[in-house]
């Protein structure tokens, strides 16, 4: 059976998502060259993956509302799979370039998340440690 949604979590995710979408819009709206759009989307998604890794590494299971706001909300709204898919599909006339962009997006995004986790854990002063929820402050 589905778990009920905590209204506080829902509220912080919605507020964070609005900020993330606004941030993405401020970056991508000025781009008028259709050939640049996929690269801007690529950059946004890679930076978002890196930052999500930092948030997850830094907060781990602590401060669930802040993690929901920053991770699911802000960075979930900032990054976008649908824009990535449409931008890649827009290059249908150059399938090798489209496939390369899609592969690079996934590989570089995962690498960004790994680096972000490393940085976040260093920020939290827990290089490899995973704190148990009952030990969280």
Image (tube, rainbow, N blue to C red):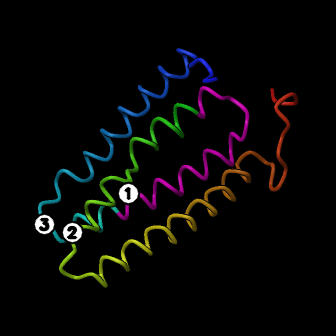
User: Are the residues at dot 3 and dot 2 in contact (C-beta closer than 8 Å)?
Assistant: yes
In magenta segment, residue 70? no
Q: Disc number at residue 24?
A: none
Work out how far the residue at label 3 is from the one at label 1, CA to CA, in angstroms: 16 Å
Identify the residue at the far bottom of this view.
96
Q: Residue at x 60, y 53 (%)?
A: 53
Q: Residue at x 50, y 64 (%)?
A: 109
What residue is pinned by disc 2? 36
Work out how far the residue at label 1 is from the one at label 2, CA to CA, in angstroms: 12 Å
Q: Disc number at residue 44?
A: 1
Percent of width and height locating residue 122: 73, 53
What residue is pinned by disc 3? 33
Q: Residue at x 36, y 78 (%)?
A: 99
Work out how far the residue at label 3 is from the one at label 2, CA to CA, in angstroms: 5 Å
Q: Quadrant of residue 8?
A: top right
* Quadrant occupied by the C terminus: top right
- Of the two numbered discs 1 and 2 on the same chain, state the one appearing first in sequence: 2
Give whichever of 35, 4 is nearer the camera. 4
Q: Is residue 12 left or right of residue 21?
A: right
Percent of width and height locating residue 60: 72, 41
User: Are the residues at dot 1 and dot 2 in contact (C-beta closer than 8 Å)?
Assistant: no
* Quadrant occupied by the N terminus: top right
Which residue range is magenta in the image?
42-67
């Amino acid at each position: 059976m589905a778990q009920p949604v905590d209204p506080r979590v829902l509220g912080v995710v919605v507020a964070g998502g609005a900020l993330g979408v606004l941030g993405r819009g401020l970056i991508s709206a000025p781009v008028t060259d259709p050939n640049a759009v996929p690269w801007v989307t690529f950059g946004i998604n890679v930076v978002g993956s890196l930052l999500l890794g930092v948030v997850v590494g830094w907060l781990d299971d602590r401060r669930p509302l802040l993690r929901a706001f920053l991770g699911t909300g802000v960075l979930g709204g900032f990054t976008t799979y649908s824009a990535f898919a449409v931008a890649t599909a827009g290059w249908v006339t150059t399938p090798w370039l489209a496939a390369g962009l899609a592969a690079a997006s996934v590989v570089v995004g995962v690498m960004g998340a790994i680096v972000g986790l490393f940085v976040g854990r260093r920020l939290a002063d827990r290089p490899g440690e995973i704190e148990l929820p009952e030990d969280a402050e």
